[in-house]
């Protein structure tokens, strides 16, 4: 399936490159006749039920002026679009067949491009992400008891004792979900929880497999020598809300698997976003490159932890980071395979936001790009479903997890940050969560940094 998909994509992209002048609204009949323009309809795209772009032909009378581009038959334009649509559908169907249950999100779909070249570029990026990511965990819905959880998750355990342990953990988590959601319905909480595929993990497993922020004296010493202060325009007027997903500057949500590599996902996400802001092109970069090649003397230890600033420092010293599709993620540390011809991006350095300065965070996000930040993750975050996550238990002055802050906004008078996680799209708001803004909630403003490209 993957070979067929890649071959078909290569063919379509080759054909697409031969028609660079096919633009939205560029197809007209000769003067004096009916003219036709083409628009994109862009509904949200959900991989579990693909809704693909449909071309619309809207009849209008005489165009206001003669088109500058060479007229081309509308039929050819529509056929080319439909071929690209078919290719994207095959790629997404192949991903589903391979175990991908995620959702690329409406914002991703809305930015697939308004012309052939943009659409082809996004198609390449989609396939790169599919090729480089892990399969999604099982989707769990409306579970009432442990038996239903096992049936939906397909999980088995090595012994009766282990099963009993997991059933106890599940029961406690289910009670937490029920109590929190009852409070949410009563207006006492601003977020909901849900039983998901992680509901039977011990706390130790949660911290080892799904977090991974670790700092070290050697890593800190090296990073400190290269860490820069952010260049901020204090007079810059920033919007009340901002979301890099709407600009097309965020790759689809990924999954770190059973590996404490959150730091690598936060770092690659930030580099991807800042490269996009500078070039207009969004790369999909390799977390596995960082996991395999990041050295301990720089504070990077594969699945046993690291820190986003150490990752930036390493990418600068390595003089690049691999493309995800050429160096796919496998959720374990392996031998380093990086070569310069695999590079998809470079950075010249990195800068750190002053601790707890959320005004500076807002300015950098709106004017420069996403931020790689640290946060404190606890049991309720593992079960987060939706809303503004305001569990006071996470305000312990500690951090243990790395995430990507891609935007901010307000809802019912509550300011919030928009945060991309690395726990797949089966978790949270399609892989994202929101935290209260302006309160350093869960330590989100403690350690934020970004690459300089």
Image: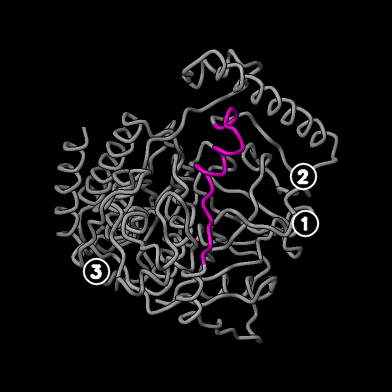
Circles 2 and 1: CB distance less than 8 Å?
yes
Circles 3 and 2: CB distance less than 8 Å?
no
Mark closer to the observer (3, 1): 1
Q: Secondary structure at mark 1?
A: strand
The x and y percentages for residue 370 are 52, 66
Pointer 2 or 1: first along the chain: 2
Circle 2 residue: 190
Please indicate whether residue 208 sits to the left or right of residue 397 in the image.
left
- Marks 3/2: CA–CA distance: 52 Å
Q: Residue at x 36, y 59 (%)?
A: 290
Q: Quadrant of the N terminus?
A: top left
Q: Nearer the viewer, residue 141 or 164?
A: 164
Mark 1: give few (<14), some (14-19) or many (20+) Cα within 10 Å.
few
- Marks 2/1: CA–CA distance: 10 Å
State the image quarter where residue 45 is shown. Answer: top left
The x and y percentages for residue 405 are 57, 60
Q: Nearer the viewer, residue 70 or 433?
A: 433
Circle 1 residue: 414
Circle 3 residue: 69
- Marks 3/1: CA–CA distance: 48 Å
Q: Secondary structure at mark 3?
A: loop
The residue range painted magenta reads 198-216
């Amino acid at each position: 399936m993957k070979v067929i998909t890649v071959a078909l994509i290569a063919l379509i992209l080759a054909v697409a490159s031969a028609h660079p002048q096919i633009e939205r609204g560029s197809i007209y009949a000769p003067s004096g006749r009916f003219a036709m323009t083409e628009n994109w309809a862009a509904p949200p795209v959900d991989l579990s039920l693909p809704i693909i772009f449909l071309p619309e032909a809207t009849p209008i009378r005489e165009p206001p002026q003669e088109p500058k581009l060479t007229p081309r038959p509308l039929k050819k334009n529509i056929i080319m679009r439909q071929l690209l649509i078919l290719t994207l559908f095959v790629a997404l169907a192949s991903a589903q067949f391979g175990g991908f249950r995620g959702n690329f999100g409406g914002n991703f779909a809305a930015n697939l491009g308004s012309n052939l070249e943009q659409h082809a570029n996004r198609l390449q990026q989609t396939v790169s992400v599919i090729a480089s990511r892990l399969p999604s965990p099982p989707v769990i819905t409306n579970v009432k008891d442990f038996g239903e959880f096992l049936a939906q998750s397909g999980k088995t355990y090595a012994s009766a004792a282990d099963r009993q342990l997991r059933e106890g953990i599940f029961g406690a988590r289910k009670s937490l979900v029920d109590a929190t959601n009852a409070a949410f319905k009563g207006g006492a909480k601003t977020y909901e929880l849900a039983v998901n595929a992680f509901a039977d993990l011990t706390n130790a497993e949660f911290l080892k497999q799904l977090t991974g922020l670790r700092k070290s004296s050697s890593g800190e010493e090296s990073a400190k020598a290269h860490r820069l202060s952010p260049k901020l325009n204090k007079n810059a007027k920033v919007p009340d809300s901002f979301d890099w997903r709407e600009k097309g500057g965020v790759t689809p949500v990924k999954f770190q698997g059973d590996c404490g590599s959150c730091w690598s996902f936060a770092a690659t996400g930030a580099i991807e976003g800042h490269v996009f802001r500078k070039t207009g092109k969004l790369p999909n970069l390799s977390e596995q490159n960082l996991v395999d090649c990041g050295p301990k003397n720089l504070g990077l230890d594969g699945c046993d932890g690291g820190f986003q600033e150490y990752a930036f420092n390493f990418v600068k010293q390595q003089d690049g980071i691999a493309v995800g599709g050429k160096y796919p993620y496998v959720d374990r540390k392996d031998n380093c395979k990086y070569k310069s011809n695999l590079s998809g991006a470079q950075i010249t350095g990195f800068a750190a936001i002053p601790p707890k300065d959320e005004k500076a965070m807002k300015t950098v996000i709106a004017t420069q790009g996403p931020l790689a930040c640290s946060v404190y993750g606890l049991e309720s975050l593992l079960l987060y479903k939706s809303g503004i996550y305001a569990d006071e238990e996470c305000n312990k002055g500690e951090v243990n997890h790395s995430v990507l802050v891609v935007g901010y906004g307000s809802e019912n008078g509550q300011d919030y940050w928009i945060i991309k996680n690395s726990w797949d799209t089966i978790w949270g708001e399609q892989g994202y969560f929101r935290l209260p803004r302006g309160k350093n909630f869960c330590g989100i403003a403690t350690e934020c940094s970004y690459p300089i490209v």
